[in-house]
Amino acid sequence: MSRVTVTVTDHIAHVQLNRPEKRNAVDPEMFEALIAAGAAVAGSTARAVVLSGAGEGFCAGIDVGSLGGMIGKDIEAMIMPRTHGEGTTNQWQEAAMVWRRLEIPVIAALHGVCFGAGLQIALGADVRIAAPETRLAVMEMKWGIVPDMGGMVLLPRLVRSDVLRRLVYTATPIDAAQAERWGLVTEIAEDPLAAAMALAREVAGQSPKAIRAAKALISVAEQEDKEAVLLAESRLQAGLIGTPEQMEVIAAQFAKRAPVFD
Protein backbone atom coordinates (compact mmCIF):
# COMPACT_ATOMS: atom_id res chain seq x y z
CA MET A 1 0.00 0.00 0.00
CA SER A 2 1.33 3.40 -0.97
CA ARG A 3 2.35 5.58 1.97
CA VAL A 4 0.88 8.62 0.18
CA THR A 5 -1.88 8.67 -2.44
CA VAL A 6 -2.35 11.36 -5.08
CA THR A 7 -5.55 11.88 -7.08
CA VAL A 8 -6.24 14.80 -9.40
CA THR A 9 -9.87 15.65 -10.18
CA ASP A 10 -11.14 18.87 -11.79
CA HIS A 11 -7.70 20.48 -11.37
CA ILE A 12 -7.60 19.71 -7.64
CA ALA A 13 -4.92 17.36 -6.31
CA HIS A 14 -5.83 15.42 -3.18
CA VAL A 15 -2.66 14.22 -1.45
CA GLN A 16 -3.38 11.89 1.44
CA LEU A 17 -1.01 10.44 4.00
CA ASN A 18 -2.00 6.78 3.90
CA ARG A 19 -0.71 4.88 6.89
CA PRO A 20 -3.82 4.94 9.08
CA GLU A 21 -2.84 1.91 11.18
CA LYS A 22 0.06 4.01 12.52
CA ARG A 23 -1.87 7.30 12.60
CA ASN A 24 0.21 8.26 9.54
CA ALA A 25 3.47 8.28 11.50
CA VAL A 26 6.30 9.22 9.16
CA ASP A 27 8.89 6.56 8.38
CA PRO A 28 11.59 6.59 5.67
CA GLU A 29 9.17 5.26 3.06
CA MET A 30 6.70 8.05 3.79
CA PHE A 31 9.41 10.71 3.55
CA GLU A 32 10.21 9.43 0.07
CA ALA A 33 6.52 9.18 -0.84
CA LEU A 34 5.80 12.75 0.27
CA ILE A 35 8.60 14.11 -1.88
CA ALA A 36 7.45 12.01 -4.82
CA ALA A 37 3.89 13.22 -4.32
CA GLY A 38 5.04 16.83 -4.45
CA ALA A 39 6.82 16.15 -7.74
CA ALA A 40 3.74 14.38 -9.12
CA VAL A 41 1.52 17.31 -8.27
CA ALA A 42 3.98 19.78 -9.79
CA GLY A 43 3.80 17.86 -13.06
CA SER A 44 0.02 17.53 -13.06
CA THR A 45 -2.85 19.76 -14.20
CA ALA A 46 -3.68 20.68 -10.60
CA ARG A 47 -4.38 24.30 -9.74
CA ALA A 48 -4.78 23.68 -6.00
CA VAL A 49 -3.82 20.95 -3.53
CA VAL A 50 -5.60 19.48 -0.53
CA LEU A 51 -3.31 17.69 1.92
CA SER A 52 -4.97 15.33 4.40
CA GLY A 53 -4.43 12.19 6.46
CA ALA A 54 -6.32 8.89 6.28
CA GLY A 55 -7.87 7.35 9.38
CA GLU A 56 -8.07 8.83 12.85
CA GLY A 57 -5.54 11.65 12.53
CA PHE A 58 -3.52 13.79 10.17
CA CYS A 59 -0.11 12.61 11.39
CA ALA A 60 1.20 11.44 14.77
CA GLY A 61 4.73 12.58 13.93
CA ILE A 62 7.89 10.62 13.36
CA ASP A 63 7.72 6.84 13.56
CA VAL A 64 9.83 6.35 16.67
CA GLY A 65 10.75 2.86 15.55
CA SER A 66 12.48 4.31 12.51
CA LEU A 67 14.74 6.42 14.73
CA GLY A 68 16.43 3.23 15.83
CA GLY A 69 17.87 2.89 12.35
CA MET A 70 19.95 6.02 12.97
CA ILE A 71 21.76 4.66 16.01
CA GLY A 72 25.47 4.23 15.38
CA LYS A 73 25.39 6.06 12.06
CA ASP A 74 27.18 9.27 11.08
CA ILE A 75 24.33 11.71 11.72
CA GLU A 76 26.11 14.69 10.18
CA ALA A 77 26.68 12.74 6.99
CA MET A 78 22.98 11.87 6.93
CA ILE A 79 21.43 15.26 7.54
CA MET A 80 23.92 17.94 6.55
CA PRO A 81 24.15 17.39 2.76
CA ARG A 82 21.70 19.56 0.80
CA THR A 83 20.23 16.88 -1.44
CA HIS A 84 16.87 18.40 -2.44
CA GLY A 85 15.19 21.70 -3.23
CA GLU A 86 17.91 22.87 -5.60
CA GLY A 87 20.51 22.41 -2.90
CA THR A 88 18.60 23.95 0.01
CA THR A 89 17.11 21.00 1.92
CA ASN A 90 17.79 17.48 3.07
CA GLN A 91 15.24 14.70 2.61
CA TRP A 92 13.47 15.34 5.93
CA GLN A 93 13.13 19.07 5.28
CA GLU A 94 11.97 18.51 1.72
CA ALA A 95 8.97 16.48 2.91
CA ALA A 96 7.56 19.72 4.35
CA MET A 97 9.16 22.40 2.20
CA VAL A 98 8.08 20.79 -1.08
CA TRP A 99 4.52 22.00 -0.39
CA ARG A 100 5.63 25.58 0.22
CA ARG A 101 7.75 25.44 -2.93
CA LEU A 102 4.88 24.30 -5.16
CA GLU A 103 3.70 27.07 -7.46
CA ILE A 104 0.04 26.42 -6.57
CA PRO A 105 -1.77 26.88 -3.23
CA VAL A 106 -1.80 23.99 -0.75
CA ILE A 107 -4.57 23.59 1.83
CA ALA A 108 -4.06 21.20 4.74
CA ALA A 109 -7.10 19.52 6.31
CA LEU A 110 -6.23 18.54 9.88
CA HIS A 111 -7.99 16.20 12.30
CA GLY A 112 -7.08 14.03 15.25
CA VAL A 113 -3.40 14.56 16.00
CA CYS A 114 -0.93 16.78 14.16
CA PHE A 115 2.31 16.29 16.03
CA GLY A 116 6.00 16.87 15.34
CA ALA A 117 6.82 15.90 11.76
CA GLY A 118 3.10 16.03 10.97
CA LEU A 119 2.84 19.62 12.12
CA GLN A 120 5.88 20.62 10.10
CA ILE A 121 4.38 19.00 6.99
CA ALA A 122 1.16 20.92 7.62
CA LEU A 123 3.15 24.15 8.06
CA GLY A 124 4.32 23.75 4.47
CA ALA A 125 0.74 24.37 3.34
CA ASP A 126 -0.55 27.86 2.55
CA VAL A 127 -3.69 27.35 4.66
CA ARG A 128 -4.57 24.96 7.52
CA ILE A 129 -8.17 24.03 8.32
CA ALA A 130 -8.61 21.97 11.49
CA ALA A 131 -11.41 19.99 13.07
CA PRO A 132 -12.39 21.26 16.54
CA GLU A 133 -10.91 18.22 18.29
CA THR A 134 -7.53 18.45 16.54
CA ARG A 135 -4.47 18.56 18.79
CA LEU A 136 -1.21 20.06 17.57
CA ALA A 137 2.30 20.01 19.00
CA VAL A 138 5.88 20.85 18.18
CA MET A 139 6.83 17.48 19.62
CA GLU A 140 10.58 17.26 19.02
CA MET A 141 11.64 18.32 22.53
CA LYS A 142 9.92 15.20 23.87
CA TRP A 143 12.67 13.21 22.16
CA GLY A 144 15.49 15.59 23.06
CA ILE A 145 15.78 17.13 19.60
CA VAL A 146 14.72 20.32 17.83
CA PRO A 147 12.39 20.93 14.86
CA ASP A 148 14.39 20.02 11.76
CA MET A 149 11.93 19.71 8.87
CA GLY A 150 11.67 23.35 7.92
CA GLY A 151 9.62 24.22 10.98
CA MET A 152 12.01 26.96 11.99
CA VAL A 153 11.61 28.60 8.59
CA LEU A 154 7.82 28.39 8.66
CA LEU A 155 6.83 28.84 12.33
CA PRO A 156 8.36 32.32 12.85
CA ARG A 157 6.19 33.62 9.99
CA LEU A 158 3.03 32.45 11.74
CA VAL A 159 3.42 32.98 15.48
CA ARG A 160 4.94 35.49 17.92
CA SER A 161 8.38 34.77 19.34
CA ASP A 162 7.05 33.98 22.82
CA VAL A 163 4.49 31.54 21.40
CA LEU A 164 7.15 29.90 19.25
CA ARG A 165 9.40 29.44 22.26
CA ARG A 166 6.61 27.99 24.39
CA LEU A 167 5.71 25.49 21.67
CA VAL A 168 9.31 24.42 21.06
CA TYR A 169 10.50 24.36 24.67
CA THR A 170 7.62 22.31 26.10
CA ALA A 171 6.31 19.95 23.35
CA THR A 172 2.90 20.39 25.01
CA PRO A 173 -0.06 19.72 22.68
CA ILE A 174 -2.61 22.48 22.20
CA ASP A 175 -6.17 22.28 20.93
CA ALA A 176 -7.43 23.70 17.64
CA ALA A 177 -8.98 26.77 19.26
CA GLN A 178 -5.67 27.76 20.86
CA ALA A 179 -3.84 26.98 17.62
CA GLU A 180 -6.19 29.30 15.75
CA ARG A 181 -5.68 32.10 18.29
CA TRP A 182 -1.91 31.72 18.02
CA GLY A 183 -1.88 31.59 14.22
CA LEU A 184 -0.99 27.94 13.62
CA VAL A 185 -4.45 27.20 12.24
CA THR A 186 -6.25 29.37 9.70
CA GLU A 187 -9.77 28.29 10.60
CA ILE A 188 -11.76 25.57 12.34
CA ALA A 189 -14.40 23.47 10.58
CA GLU A 190 -16.50 20.48 11.64
CA ASP A 191 -15.47 18.75 8.41
CA PRO A 192 -12.02 20.11 7.54
CA LEU A 193 -11.62 17.96 4.43
CA ALA A 194 -14.91 19.20 2.97
CA ALA A 195 -13.97 22.78 3.85
CA ALA A 196 -10.52 22.35 2.29
CA MET A 197 -12.03 20.91 -0.89
CA ALA A 198 -14.49 23.81 -1.11
CA LEU A 199 -11.67 26.32 -0.76
CA ALA A 200 -9.59 24.41 -3.32
CA ARG A 201 -12.48 24.57 -5.81
CA GLU A 202 -12.69 28.32 -5.27
CA VAL A 203 -8.96 28.71 -5.87
CA ALA A 204 -8.99 26.39 -8.89
CA GLY A 205 -11.68 28.56 -10.47
CA GLN A 206 -9.42 31.63 -10.48
CA SER A 207 -6.92 32.55 -13.18
CA PRO A 208 -4.18 29.87 -12.90
CA LYS A 209 -1.45 32.31 -13.93
CA ALA A 210 -2.63 34.96 -11.47
CA ILE A 211 -2.80 32.42 -8.62
CA ARG A 212 0.75 31.25 -9.32
CA ALA A 213 1.93 34.85 -9.53
CA ALA A 214 0.19 35.65 -6.24
CA LYS A 215 1.89 32.75 -4.43
CA ALA A 216 5.26 33.78 -5.86
CA LEU A 217 4.68 37.40 -4.83
CA ILE A 218 3.67 36.45 -1.29
CA SER A 219 6.85 34.40 -0.97
CA VAL A 220 8.93 37.40 -2.03
CA ALA A 221 6.98 39.69 0.32
CA GLU A 222 7.70 37.37 3.27
CA GLN A 223 11.43 37.23 2.66
CA GLU A 224 12.76 40.26 0.79
CA ASP A 225 13.16 43.98 1.44
CA LYS A 226 10.63 46.52 0.21
CA GLU A 227 12.56 47.38 -2.95
CA ALA A 228 12.59 43.74 -4.03
CA VAL A 229 8.89 43.38 -3.22
CA LEU A 230 7.94 46.48 -5.20
CA LEU A 231 9.97 45.26 -8.16
CA ALA A 232 8.36 41.80 -7.94
CA GLU A 233 4.89 43.38 -7.88
CA SER A 234 5.60 45.21 -11.12
CA ARG A 235 7.34 42.29 -12.82
CA LEU A 236 4.62 39.77 -12.03
CA GLN A 237 1.83 42.20 -12.90
CA ALA A 238 3.44 42.94 -16.25
CA GLY A 239 3.25 39.25 -17.03
CA LEU A 240 -0.51 39.17 -16.38
CA ILE A 241 -2.12 42.33 -17.70
CA GLY A 242 -3.43 42.02 -21.22
CA THR A 243 -2.77 38.31 -21.60
CA PRO A 244 -5.53 36.10 -23.07
CA GLU A 245 -6.10 34.55 -19.65
CA GLN A 246 -6.60 37.92 -17.98
CA MET A 247 -8.88 39.04 -20.83
CA GLU A 248 -10.99 35.92 -20.24
CA VAL A 249 -11.32 36.85 -16.56
CA ILE A 250 -12.55 40.32 -17.50
CA ALA A 251 -14.95 38.97 -20.13
CA ALA A 252 -16.37 36.47 -17.63
CA GLN A 253 -16.90 39.21 -15.05
CA PHE A 254 -18.89 41.35 -17.49
CA ALA A 255 -20.87 38.34 -18.72
CA LYS A 256 -21.53 37.18 -15.15
CA ARG A 257 -20.25 33.68 -15.91
CA ALA A 258 -17.41 31.47 -14.77
CA PRO A 259 -14.17 32.00 -16.71
CA VAL A 260 -12.95 29.17 -18.93
CA PHE A 261 -9.22 28.43 -18.92
CA ASP A 262 -7.20 26.04 -21.06
Image: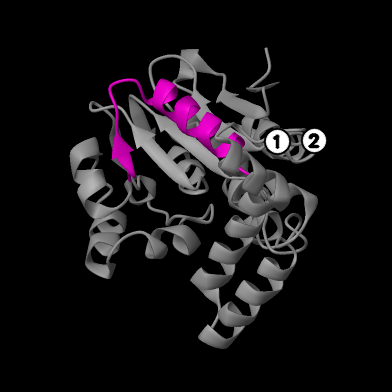
Q: Is residue 254 left or right of residue 8?
A: left
- Image location of residue 77, percent across then percent down: 71, 59
- Image location of residue 139, percent across then percent down: 35, 45
Asked if residue 237 can be seen in this view, the reply is yes
Q: Which residue is mark 2?
A: 262
- Foreground disc of the pair 2, 1: 2
Q: Nearer the viewer, residue 235 or 90?
A: 235
Q: What stretch of residues is rendered in magenta?
A: 185-207
Dot 1 surroundings within 10 Å: few (below 14), some, or many (20 or more)?
Answer: some
Q: Which residue is mark 1?
A: 32
The answer to which image quadrant residue 196 occupies is top left
Q: Name the amino acid, label 1.
A: Glu
- Alpha carbon separation for disc pair 2 and 1: 32 Å
Residue 196 counted in the magenta span = yes
- Image location of residue 82, percent across then percent down: 73, 61
Q: Residue placed at 52% from the left, 84% from the top? A: 226
Q: Is residue 163 above or below residue 51?
A: below
Q: Residue placed at 27% from the left, 63% from the top? A: 165
Q: Is residue 63 above or below residue 143?
A: above
Q: Residue furthest bottom?
A: 227
Q: Name the amino acid, label 2.
A: Asp
Q: How many marks?
A: 2
Residue 55 counted in the magenta span = no
Badge 1 marks a residue whose secondary structure is helix
Q: Residue placed at 37% from the left, 26% from the top? A: 192
The answer to which image quadrant residue 4 occupies is top right
Q: Quadrant of the C terminus?
A: top right
Dot 2 surroundings within 10 Å: few (below 14), some, or many (20 or more)?
Answer: few
Q: Nearer the viewer, residue 90 or 184?
A: 184
Q: Nearer the viewer, residue 197 or 83?
A: 197
